[in-house]
Image (cartoon, rainbow, N blue to C red):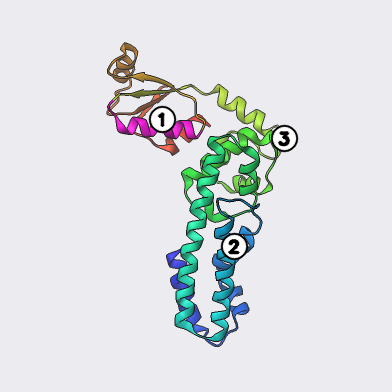
Amino acid sequence: MKLLISTLLTLLCLHANTSFPELFSQLGTPLYKADRLFAKLPEDASYSQLIKAYHINQDRALEIHERGNKQVYFKALRSLNKEYENILRVLKRELHNAIKTNDYPRFLTICNAGIDALYEQKSFETSVFQYYLSHKQQGKSAYLDKRIRTDKAYEKHYGADISSHAVSERSSSHHARQNPLILLTTTWCGQCKKAKRFLRKNGIAYTEYDAEKSSKGRELMKKHHGTGYPTFIIGNESRSGLSPRWLSDRLY
């Protein structure tokens, strides 16, 4: 986004005599497109006031541009960008909460606004895809279906052809055939607690063994040559330390 703003400012200087609609057409800046996407979201106490303020400040920025005050306009754009990023943070938090509480209708209303910038973080995008595919029988999202199809390795990651209603059933059965996840932890390990929060948040089932206090845990740690905590075991493969990508590649 910082690069986008830098490019925006450079092009504005190069096109000082160009009207805003033409310049906007060239840049396609998400700062103004976002206002239309935000408008697709339902009213909600967690973000609606932020979106209303964003809309007002966007209009003010356009008015400043029309008056030709470049310095003030650049300042307005930087301020608008901060508001934009804050709204994205709030929306990501709301999606996390919807997944955590299994509120699928709320999950869909946020996803269906089609805000691409929400999914720039791969681990977050993966958790959204996984939750959607496991609940798709409750309602489809053309937007998410399209995003999943554009994932270069979606079939490897999610084990399904998303073009049919049977996707969620195939996806679930694919998941059921996989080896269960075993987690080796210790009571004093802070990273172990973080790993368990991640697994619960993403609805990933696991069996936990204390690698110091239980004979089974000590046996598995030795067998899989664990080098630290937490250690994840899936079938004959193991990894010490949390890696969402490693888990996704082996569980789905």
**Circle 1 residues within 10 Å: few <14, some 14–19, many ≥20:** some
Local crowd size for mark 2, using a 10 Å CA cut-off: few (<14), some (14–19), many (≥20): some
SS at badge 2 = helix
- Quarter of the figure with residue 19: bottom right
Neighbourhood count class around disc 3 (C-alpha, 10 Å): few under 14, some 14–19, many 20 upward: few
Residue type beneath disc 2: Lys
The part of the image, by quadrant, that contains residue 108 is top right
Question: Of residues 221 and 117, which is closer to you in this image?
Answer: 117
- Identify residue for label 3: 165
The spot of residue 169 in percent (x, y) is 66, 28
| Residue at the spot 40% in from the left edge and 21% down from the top edge | 208
Which of marks 2 and 1 precedes in the sequence? 2
Estimate the spatial distance between the alpha carbons at disc 1 and disc 2, rounded to whole Å: 37 Å
Task: Single out the residue that lies furthest toward the bottom.
Answer: 17
Residue receiving disc 1: 196
* Direction from residue 40 to residue 29 in the image, left or right: left
Q: Secondary structure at mark 3?
A: loop
Provide the residue designation for mark 2.
52
Q: Is residue 37 visible?
A: yes
Residue 240 on image: x %, y %: 33, 30
Of label 1 and label 3, which has the lower sequence position?
3
Label 1, secondary structure: give it. Answer: helix
Say which residue appears at 66% left-offset and 36% top-offset. Answer: 136
Answer above or below: position of 174 versus 75: above
Residue 120: give x, y in percent of width and height. 49, 52
Q: Nearer the viewer, residue 193 or 247?
A: 193
